[in-house]
């Protein structure tokens, strides 16, 4: 094949092949069950939005906006961005569709692809799927705890092991400006020892320095003033309550004063759930990977143009969960089992089988077949493999006589019934 014709999926993006669909399905099923239980309604938004929505909501100086946005100009001249996350589009939709006037708290959930132009590596893709939950119109700390509990429950329901939750509070407009000043004064005194990115961050986004993974910044971080010591009264008691609720519902967590998250809209509580291992686990490289993250964002609705509505939510990365499921030997959704198998021999029998198959579909009986095959032995083997309880055999003679043979695959017993009685006979046998 010439180089020109060897077309590939775009870098960092991949097909979701049939063998992987069962993992997406399993996660979807667990998430939608839990969403129903906690009273969340599903929402979808376009995968593109006005670019301004993202820079305004996520923050112009964040990596997501500065480095990772996929942007496009439409023929009409509009500047759009592929969604790198769902929270800002949902806030836009909440305002645009008048959801502020509906009874609050308003709870929404979602499941779909996001796009970030990141350097592709294990578990970091340029197209990845997120599911998430957002709660609008409730400032009580119980919501923060409940959002964390929901994600913990989903990961537990999926049977994932060795999960950790880290939590922090990054204050609000009352206490954060003072802390940021304190932190930048401290960091300025150590500026020469910081990495290049952090030197830039002192001016642009000082809190992100706390999140820096560079070796040389670690000792400076350790001695930095901590936000938890500088929260205002309200943020302090809100955070204390969140922790008390988590204790009450026995969700384990650790405090991480350096957790600040990569998006600018957070206030008060922030958290992440992750899996960490020192060694490679069945193809999963050693290290720490965030499976989910979120927190409170009480100022975002107003920032995007809505009323002053508090909100809290989180999102999880589906591919990261899937690679952990595979590493921990957890299976995806099971293929639906067939109940009966329809075997046929000869031209007339094949034709009659086609309409018989439809009769079974209408009666909601799951049928396996391999109409392309002509050997009865091969078809019976297949019926066995698929776990059919009964096999219906329709040969040339049966087709001419208008009957079909029903074979019990366990006992080998056979019975011949009229074609128009096949469905009721099968139903009766399946009931036994
Ligand atoms: P985030 O931490 O940027 O938060 O993303 C949430 C999750 O998406 C991460 O924990 C990770 O599992 C997954 N993820 C992020 N980037 C990638 C990537 N390049 N490849 C694979 N997986 C990835 C948010 O997006 C916020 N909107 C969460 C939120 C909702 N906060 C409040 N409400």
Image (cartoon, grey):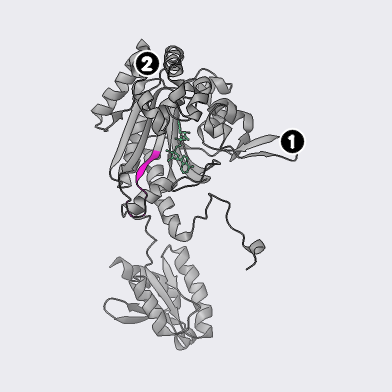
Query: Residue at 56% across / 31% down in the picture?
Result: 93
Query: Residue at 58% across / 30% down in the picture?
Result: 54
Q: Tell me where the magenta segment starts and ends, as one range.
A: 281-291
Q: Is 289 part of what is drawn in magenta?
A: yes
User: According to the image, label 1 marks what residue?
Assistant: 77
Whole-angstrom CA distance, mark 2 to mark 1, is: 44 Å
Q: Is 97 part of what is drawn in magenta?
A: no
Location of residue 70 with respect to 210 vertically, above or below: below
Q: Quadrant of the N terminus?
A: bottom right
Mark 2 within 8 Å of ligand 1, using the beta carbon: no
Q: Earlier in the sequence, mark 2 or mark 1?
A: 1
Q: Position of residue 251 (x, y in %)?
A: 27, 33
**420 sits to left or right of 327:** right
Identify which residue, 285 or 29, lies in the foreground.
Answer: 285
User: Where, by quadrant of the figure, is residue 52 drawn?
Assistant: top right
Q: Residues within 10 Å of mark 1 (few under 14, many from 20)?
A: few
Give the residue furthest to the front: 192
Identify which residue, 249 or 38, lies in the foreground.
Answer: 249
Residue 405 makes an appearance in the image: no
Which of the numbered marks, if any, corresponds to residue 415? none
Query: Residue at 35% across / 73% down in the picture?
Result: 385
Q: Position of residue 119 (x, y in %)?
A: 52, 43
Give the residue furthest to the right: 76
Identify which residue, 358 or 165, lies in the foreground.
Answer: 165
Query: Residue at 55% across / 26% down in the picture?
Result: 59
User: According to the image, label 2 marks what residue?
Assistant: 235
């Amino acid at each position: 094949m010439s180089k020109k014709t060897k077309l590939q999926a775009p870098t960092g993006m991949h097909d979701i092949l049939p063998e992987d669909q069962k993992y997406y399905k399993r996660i979807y099923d667990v998430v939608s069950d839990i969403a129903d239980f906690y009273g969340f309604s599903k929402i979808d938004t376009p995968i593109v939005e006005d670019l301004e929505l993202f820079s305004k909501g996520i923050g112009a100086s964040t990596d997501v906006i500065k480095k990772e946005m996929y942007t496009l100009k439409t023929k009409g001249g509009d500047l759009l961005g592929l969604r790198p996350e769902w929270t800002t589009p949902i806030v836009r939709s909440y305002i645009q569709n008048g959801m502020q006037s509906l009874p609050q708290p308003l709870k929404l959930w979602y499941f779909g692809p996001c796009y970030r132009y990141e350097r592709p590596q294990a578990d970091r893709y340029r197209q990845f799927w997120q599911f998430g939950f957002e709660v609008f119109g409730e400032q009580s700390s119980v919501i923060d705890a409940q959002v964390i509990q929901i994600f913990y429950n989903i990961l537990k329901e999926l049977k994932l092991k060795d999960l950790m939750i880290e939590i922090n509070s990054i204050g609000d407009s009352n206490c954060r400006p003072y802390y940021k000043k304190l932190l930048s004064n401290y960091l300025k005194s150590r500026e020469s020892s910081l990495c290049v990115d952090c030197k830039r961050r002192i001016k642009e986004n000082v809190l992100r320095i706390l999140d820096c993974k560079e070796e040389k910044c670690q000792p400076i971080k350790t001695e930095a003033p901590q936000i938890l010591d500088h929260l205002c009264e309200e943020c302090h008691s809100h955070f204390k309550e969140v922790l008390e609720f988590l204790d009450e519902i026995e969700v384990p967590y650790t405090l991480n004063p350096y957790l600040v998250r990569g998006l600018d809209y957070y206030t008060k509580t922030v958290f992440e759930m992750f899996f960490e291992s020192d060694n490679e686990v069945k193809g999963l490289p050693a290290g720490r990977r965030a499976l989910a993250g979120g927190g409170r964002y009480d100022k975002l609705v107003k920032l995007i143009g809505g009323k002053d509505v508090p909100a809290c939510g989180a999102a999880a990365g589906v591919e990261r969960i899937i690679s952990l499921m595979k590493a921990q030997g957890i299976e995806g959704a099971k293929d639906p089992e067939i109940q009966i198998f329809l075997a046929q021999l000869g031209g007339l029998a094949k034709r009659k089988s086609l309409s018989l198959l439809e009769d079974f579909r209408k009666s909601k009986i799951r049928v396996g077949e391999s109409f392309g095959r002509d050997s009865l032995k091969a078809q019976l083997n297949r019926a066995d493999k698929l776990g059919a309880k009964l096999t219906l055999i329709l040969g040339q003679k049966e087709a001419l006589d208008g009957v079909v043979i029903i074979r019990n695959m366990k006992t080998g017993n056979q019975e011949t019934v009229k074609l128009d009685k096949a469905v009721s006979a099968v139903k009766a046998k399946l009931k036994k």
